[in-house]
Image (tube, rainbow, N blue to C red):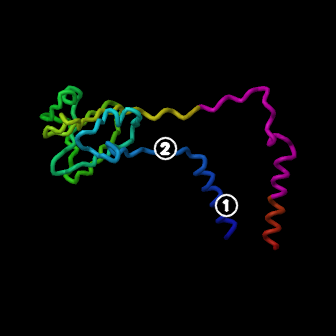
Amino acid sequence: MEKRLLTLAAVLFAMVAVVPEVSATRWTVGSKMGWTTNVNYTIWAQNITFYNGDWLFFVYDRNQMNVLEVNKTDYESCNADHPLKNWTRGAGRDVVPLNVTRHFYFISGKGFCYGGMKLAVRVENMPPPPKASPVKSGAPSSILNRPYVLPAVFAIGAMWDAFVHFW
């Protein structure tokens, strides 16, 4: 029973070690300042690469502000009259999924956009994983290609099994 658990643990570890980690990021808009006036969100976002699958987390005073997704023209003019989507849910803790590769434009209505509460982000797809370099023909052959390596591995395994079983 113990051998089976060890074998299962080894297989699970190998599976986890081989699978590359891909994860989305939840970005708190404005970092510690949150979604508020007198923050330059262009500077906040300029060094961040937003990927498909990430989220924007807006934290703000729910009694005064809101989160509106608008088109580029309404973003530039701070026009909140015809939002594409109102992400305000009433708690002042709203999450916007960035699940399409495109530009997103957000403003706060009620005049707060003029105080700087506007954010434009460009969402991209994750870059492909790096390709493995080809094996050079002059490279030394693998030690596993030697005729004695695999039989030696099996012999050591059999001896260990016998040792554990009879000990």
In the depicted structure, whether residue 91 falls above or below residue 124:
below
Q: Nearer the viewer, mark 2 or mark 1?
A: 2
Q: Which residue is mark 2?
A: 22
Kind of residue indicated by mark 1: Thr
Going by the picture, which residue comes out furthest to the front?
A: 38
Q: Is residue 133 above or below residue 89?
A: above
Residue shown at 70% from the left, 66% from the top: 3
Q: Could you tell me which secondary element the residue under label 2 belongs to? A: loop
Label 1: few (<14), some or many (≥20) within 10 Å? few
Between 115 and 85, the residue placed more toward the observer is 115
The one nearer the camera, 7 or 71, is 71
Between the residue at mark 2 and the residue at mark 1, the CA separation in whole angstroms equals 27 Å
Q: Which picture quadrant has residue 134?
A: top right
Looking at the image, residue 167 lies above or below residue 144: below
Q: Residue at x 60, y 56 (%)?
A: 12
Q: Which residue is mark 1?
A: 7
* Residue 110 relative to residue 59: left or right: left
Query: Left or right of 27: which side holds 13?
Result: right
Where residue 153 sits in the image (x, y, percent)?
Answer: 81, 53
Which quadrant would the C terminus be assigned to in this image?
A: bottom right
Q: Amino acid at mark 2?
A: Val
Q: Where's the N terminus, which quadrant?
A: bottom right
